[in-house]
Image (cartoon, rainbow, N blue to C red):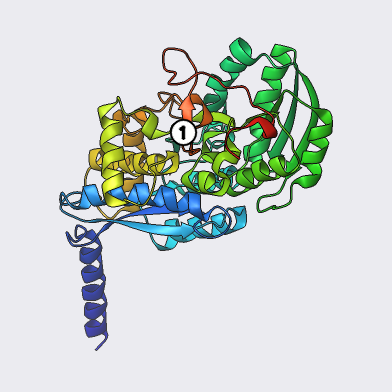
Amino acid sequence: MKKFFIFVFHAIFLAGFSISAVPVSASEPIKIGILGPFTGSLAFNASEMRKGMELALDGVNSKGGLFGRQVELVFGDTEAKPDKGLAAVKKLVTRDNVLVVGGGYASSVNIATSEFCHYEGCPNVVAIAISPTITARGYDFVFRTSPNSPQFLEGVNEWLEKIKRPKTVAFFMENSDYGRDGQKIWEAQCKKLGAKVLGSFYFEIGSSDFTAPISKLKDLKPDVVFSIASTTEAALIQRQAKELNFVSQWIGVGGQFTEAFFEMTGPVSEYAMGSSLEPTKAMKDPITAAFVNAYKAKFPESRPGIFSSQGYDNLMVIVDAIKRAGEPTGNLVADRKKIRDALKVTDIRLSQGLIQFDETGQVFTVFPSPVQVQLDENCKPDTQIIFPPERAASEYQVPKPWAERRCK
């Protein structure tokens, strides 16, 4: 009887061993984790990113997927909160067993989630969050397909130096890594220009009443107000500035200028400036034009903006790396390392342009342009590239007092 149990034990052990060594089933999907604030105040922006990813996913799966297997996206909701983001990424990496984690919005969240991915040995390719900290730590498993904040602000800083030359400035920033990192960059530029900083004001994500700090800005009368905010807060700030009859040159970042931003502000957003990778402004590039046209066909009621473009490129970079790494074996540790190694030598042209990573995992080949919100003959707002001259589609317009504006 004892020999029988020993035989059974060895049979079960060997059967289990042989099953674990069998290649992954051809019917099993290739799973990619996607982080984003899919609920909460930033949900619209995350939904735009998701649409771009869905377009990319359709293109991949309609052609047979990867290695004859369908690609599956597993979403984790961060709610734009670091603790929620950590909970979501832990589930994706350790329970859902995704090969890679993509997506990502809100720098404070992605600073935390990217660190977790690095120490778990799971590649993390950040789509949108722009704090330099994310890639500056030298984490071997962390990459980013979006320019970081210094790269985003480089063109605007050159415009400030060569065109605007402000004498006085103020800061009105989201109280986060995203906002404070941007302020540091602009403060350095202002020091270089000799511009005097009149004041710095901060607000929390989800704030809705900005009248007190805008009233103080009105008293200070700065030539330029730098403001880093997400779509909803940025729109409310513009509307409340009008209510308080405050005029200045507002300068933000491209993430403000979404379809939702224009719907919430209308002509009120006129003259606002930022730095953007708006794909519809780069239609001379056939790859960008193909993305825009495909996006319009799939989502005819939506505007193909920066977040959808960044989402598309993010997933396409991940898919490209998995393809070059070879079919996953089911050994997560080994498969993830191969994908990490493939990501390091990424060289692919997508809707934002050429995607290549430097030694820190940061894309260094994508160049945002300074843009200004201008109105058409029907008072409809849209961004126009205003600098440098060789890329400009329009000239810079100095903000007029509210009473003198054509569109109310």
Q: Quadrant of the N terminus?
A: bottom left
Secondary structure beneath dot 1 equals loop
| Placement of 58 over or under 318, stated as above or below | below
Image location of residue 164, percent across then percent down: 64, 15
Q: Is residue 141 visible?
A: no
Tally the marks.
1
Image location of residue 223, percent across then percent down: 73, 23
Q: Tell me the residue at 19%/55% (across/down).
A: 69
Does residue 178 appear left or right of residue 368 in this picture?
A: right
Image location of residue 349, percent across then percent down: 29, 29
Q: Is residue 91 visible?
A: yes
Question: 53 and 392: which one is in front?
Answer: 392
Q: Tell me the residue at 61%/40% (across/down).
A: 408
Image location of residue 362, percent across then percent down: 46, 30
Q: Tell me the residue at 71%/40% (across/down).
A: 241
Residue of label 1: 377
Q: Amino acid at mark 1?
A: Glu
Q: Quadrant of residue 249?
A: top right
Q: Tell me the residue at 29%/26% (across/down).
A: 285
Mark 1 nearby-residue class (10 Å; few <14, some 14–19, many ≥20): few
In the displayed orientation, state which residue is furthest to the top. Answer: 162
Does residue 157 appear left or right of residue 368 in this picture?
A: right
Q: Quadrant of residue 21?
A: bottom left
Question: 28 and 163: which one is in front?
Answer: 163
Question: 224 and 379: which one is in front?
Answer: 379
Question: 338 and 2: which one is in front?
Answer: 338
